Image (spheres, rainbow, N blue to C red):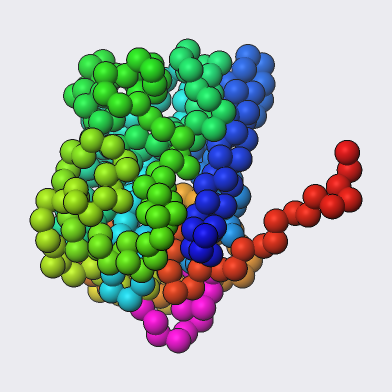
Amino acid sequence: MTAEYDFFVRMQQKMDEQAEDVWDMVRYSRSPGYRLRLGEVTTTELNFFRLREFWTKRVYIVTNEPDETTTGADWEWIIGHGDRWIQIRVQAKIINANGSFAELGHPRATGEQMRRLLDPGRESVACRWMPLYVFYASENVAKTTVTRDAGCSAQLAWIVNENYGKPPRRAGRLRALDHLPPRVPRPGAIPWSHIFNGLVARLRAGESLDTIIGSLADASLPPAVKSIDDFWEPRVTAGTCSAELPAYIRTIVARDDDDFDGAPLTELHVATPESRHAEAERASGQAEGEPGVAYTVRDGSLEDSPVPLPSRTLMIDRADTPEVLATLPSFVSVLDIDRLPPLPERPSETGAPG
């Protein structure tokens, strides 16, 4: 098998290992008397720390606008190279001690976050993109079967929306029983590593990653596909798409031979002309002893890091600000197929303790 095949198989194995750890953490954090506070942001950060060998770049999105109540995604994977990229956008939800995904109707049971995930606007997504939910859960609180490798499980966002129903909260279905197998009315959530099963199957059959991305990048995905595997099947399409990549993706993947280009951890600052002017005024006031106001950094960033990350800035028109900023993910995990990192050697079993 090829190095590309091995890369994604090893990534799936690491995702399974992390899902088992999440299963354990959720189980104990939701047990009576246990003091561990475990939320979606912390769990997502731990997940991607575990997957740190399986991206070519991680980009934190930094804005100067409020985002928590409306943003439609926690993260996304983009896979490709040059001007050909595909996109998997994800919103995470963690189960509470009562066996519910209580924040599924966020904010305030309006379902606005879900709507943004499902319909972010053409300017925010690549031609081939897929919205998913990833659920963090364990069997003791879910009150249904949750295998350990499904401590992180994935489901198509449109199916989650159908299972949830309509706001207000009293009408929305939040119980894990309504969203995890085997009692869901539609196909159940799958272990999150299985998101990439369709890709691995094509690599196993001898296709190159370049060929696979090339067959998908211009093929729009229908909004209500039957399974996550359909994302990797070029025959499942709503037609040919010729739209340009979103500006923020173009800014992230541009080969500008700068510090950002070669760094594994970076920031993308998204701003308007008005916000940059206001920022300059605040900086001027701070120099004169007035308090300054920093950019609002989306949850999960390295805002407390003592070393600034390499960054780029994307200027957007003020007229586009509400929709564009509201749909951006907290961070982007980039898999540039020209820059896939070499995998570490597998641990040798020779001389291992018995």
Is 273 included in the stretch rendered in magenta? no
Counting the numbered discs, the total is 0
When asked about the image quadrant of residue 183, the answer is top left
Start-end of magenta stretch: 254-266
Between residues 62 and 157, which one lies in front from this camera angle?
A: 157
Task: Give how far across and how far down residue 327 sits, in percent.
Answer: 27, 52
Give the left or right position of residue 19, taking residue 250 as reference: right
Farthest bottom residue in view: 257
Between residues 73 and 55, which one lies in front from this camera angle?
A: 55
When asked about the image quadrant of residue 126, the answer is bottom left
Task: Give how far across and how far down residue 299 sits, in percent.
Answer: 46, 49
Point 39% across, 23% down: residue? 180
Give the left or right position of residue 306, taking residue 348 as reference: left
Task: Give how far across and how far down residue 353 sits, in percent.
Answer: 89, 43
Res. 230 in view: yes
Task: Give how far across and how far down residue 128 sits, in percent.
Answer: 24, 56
Between residues 167 and 125, which one lies in front from this camera angle?
A: 125
Quadrant location, the C terminus = top right
Compared with 114, 278 (above or below) is below
Farthest left residue in view: 239
Compared with 218, 162 (above or below) is above
Compared with 118, 138 (above or below) is above
When asked about the image quadrant of residue 80, the answer is bottom left
Point 23% across, 17% down: residue? 171
